[in-house]
Image: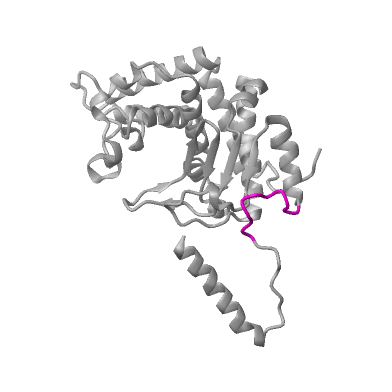
């Protein structure tokens, strides 16, 4: 917080030093608003969000910077307006409407997170990793790195890894908080969870052969479950099979990584079907089709026309 205050004071001093030699006038409207946005002038984006998020789903999509919504352990910056507009379109089309298509509007309306909060930059940790998003209390999803969206939105791998997979991952946590999955899941690779050590060189490779779909899956069974589902539905069957072939390990391994991953995937599949009546293969088909539309520029990401 002290660093933020110093930065703002420095900007004031710089502005004052240039006032004598410039006729430009600073806008009286700050990009950083108070924690209550009730008095903020409604933009076309605000009106679009009401019609496309708030009214049909009771979802609040916060793109203005609110200090009380941020994690005080990180230095954060506001999300860019135009890229926030684009991300709102992407989330609606590839995530919200994909769950509508497969699970039904009532499922989405009832269980999808009721708040998205955007910040401009990723949250960097001192172990060399960064936070792409978080879920809180089954309600709020934080999405970071919004100001980098333009350079990644036309690359499917980056778009998934930095933004969309994060949403599916965090939504999985919300579903798990509502209905827990079988305790048998955590027993499949019970000795392989290493908490925050998942990012060290020892565990950053070879995780497929150990029965984990991503390096982060090794953190805990909770993260493993969310990684299994979010990775599965954001990748093609061909890519998944390539990973399974890599996970198979040596022919003489009595219990290869592939068997372990597939055992966990079957539990994820059963959980989603039995608890939520969602077929994860149908969900993957919908998600990938919509993501391809975004990457191919078939979706107007800046259109704020209210229909």
Magenta part of the chain: 31-41
- For residue 13, which quarter of the picture? bottom right
Which residue sits at x=76%, y=50%?
A: 42
Give how far across and how far down residue 147 sits, in percent: 56, 55
- For residue 287, which quarter of the picture? top right
Relative height, residue 228 to residue 201 (above, below): above
Which residue sits at x=45%, y=52%?
A: 72
Q: Is residue 99 left or right of residue 214?
A: right
Magenta region includes residue 123: no
Q: Is residue 24 left or right of residue 72?
A: right
Quarter holding the C terminus is top right
- Residue 168 visible: yes
Magenta region includes residue 40: yes
Foreground of the two, 39 or 258: 39
- Residue 303 visible: no
Foreground of the two, 164 or 243: 164
Numbered label tally: 0
């Amino acid at each position: 917080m002290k660093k933020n205050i110093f930065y703002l004071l420095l900007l004031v001093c710089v502005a004052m030093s240039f006032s004598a030699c410039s006729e430009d006038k600073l806008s009286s409207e700050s990009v950083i608003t108070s924690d209550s946005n009730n008095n903020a002038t409604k933009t076309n984006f605000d009106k679009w969000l009401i019609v496309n998020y708030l009214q049909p789903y009771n979802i609040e999509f916060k793109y203005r910077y609110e200090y009380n919504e941020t994690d005080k352990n990180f230095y954060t910056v506001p999300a860019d307006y135009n890229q926030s507009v684009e991300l709102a379109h992407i989330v609606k089309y590839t995530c919200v409407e994909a769950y509508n298509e497969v699970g039904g509007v009532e499922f989405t309306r009832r269980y999808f997170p009721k708040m998205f909060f955007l910040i401009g930059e990723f949250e960097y940790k001192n172990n060399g990793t960064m936070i792409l998003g978080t879920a809180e209390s089954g309600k709020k999803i934080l999405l970071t790195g919004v100001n980098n969206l333009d350079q990644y939105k036309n690359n499917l791998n980056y778009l998934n890894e930095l933004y969309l997979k994060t949403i599916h991952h965090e939504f999985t946590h919300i579903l798990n908080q509502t209905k827990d999955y079988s305790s048998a899941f955590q027993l499949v690779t019970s000795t392989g969870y290493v908490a925050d050590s998942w990012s060290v060189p020892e565990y950053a490779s070879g995780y497929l052969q150990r029965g984990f779909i991503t390096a982060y899956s090794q953190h805990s069974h909770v993260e493993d479950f969310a990684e299994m589902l979010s990775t599965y539905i954001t990748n093609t069957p061909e890519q998944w099979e390539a990973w399974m072939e890599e996970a198979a390990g040596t022919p003489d391994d009595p219990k290869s990584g592939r068997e372990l991953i597939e055992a966990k995937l079957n539990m994820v599949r059963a959980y989603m079907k039995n608890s939520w009546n969602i077929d994860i293969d149908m969900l993957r088909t919908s998600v990938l089709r919509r993501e391809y539309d975004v990457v191919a520029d078939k979706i107007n990401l800046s259109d704020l026309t209210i229909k």
